Image (cartoon, rainbow, N blue to C red):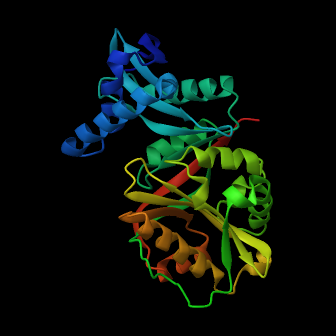
Amino acid sequence: MNSDLSSIDVQVASVAERAGAFALLLCAVPEAERFAQVAALLAEVSRQPDACNGLLVARQRGAVVGAIWLQLLAGGGANVWPPRATETAPAGTLGALVSAAVERARAAKCAILQVLLPNAEQPLAALFASAGFAHVADLIYLVALPNAAANAPSQSPISFESVTTAGVTRLERVLEQTYAGSLDCPALNGRRTPAEVLDEYRHIGVFDPARWLLVQQAGRDIGCLILNAHADRTTWELVYMGLVPSARGHGFGQLVVGQARQLAAAAGARKILLAVDRQNQPAVAMYEACGFVGWDERAAWVRFLD
């Protein structure tokens, strides 16, 4: 890289630049897969034109030499795709892209920015640390096959009620209660209201309130299970599950996960995914006991824009 950073101009990517920007962001993906992923992203943003408002490119003499994507989310959050630069880009291009993304998020009144980095990408970790991000968790991504008979005792001590009949207010109330003493990304607790968190969850994949469930025992709410299908409908995501403190340690977690696998199987899904904080060892062990296996890991870095 050269050192002439003054020649760099960071702006929103034009329509003609989007394919190249996405290809640069996915440069670590094998070429054959990269082409398909770029095509999928272009198709996705064609349905959501505003999604590219945070796709920024660094130009040098008219040529794109770097890119970053700030994905604005509902509920006051945003995901940052790690920046990438060409070999000819000036030193400092990645830092300029991160700074531009942060300022754009601030202008959009985002409260929380999150970037997920492969554990091997130490230079990028240092870059985000210098930009005010903090390492809050190491996430393990797990996958399992749907199972129509998973953890389904003939007489279960718990039952489930859809938010379509229970109402979102009850879900917000129990969601907040599940955060108490949680080992899953505790640094994020209290940063947003339950309503803001649920607003973000609604925009993950395909939202169906019938798949958002309250967990009940003896007539009282003791937890919640939030499931969304991905756009292809063959993959489901366990977006969130949690139990209130008094309901933990009784084996209810495996029954809740079993319910998720049963619903996914009934809908014809081929797999179900989730992410869990590595430090939440009770949850990791529970998911593994339910048949989930690891397929990826990421370090979560966050910046709060108060």
The residue under the point 48% across, 73% down is: 262
Q: Nearer the viewer, residue 10 or 174?
A: 174
The residue under the point 23% across, 45% down is: 33
Q: Quadrant of the C terminus?
A: top right
Q: Is residue 183 visible to us here?
A: no
Q: Position of residue 258 (x, y in %)?
A: 52, 77
The residue under the point 45% across, 82% down is: 149
Q: Nearer the viewer, residue 48 or 39?
A: 48
In this rendering, is residue 289 above or below 67?
Answer: below
Q: Position of residue 68 (x, y in %)?
A: 45, 30
In this rendering, is residue 60 above or below 285?
Answer: above
Quadrant of the rendered image containing residue 216: bottom right
Q: Position of residue 239 (x, y in %)?
A: 56, 58
> What residue occupies the far left of the structure in this picture?
32
> What residue occupies the far top of the structure in this picture?
61
Q: Position of residue 70 (x, y in %)?
A: 52, 32
On screen, residue 62 versus residue 212, left or right, reads left
Quadrant of the rendered image containing residue 144: bottom left
Quadrant of the rendered image containing residue 189: bottom right
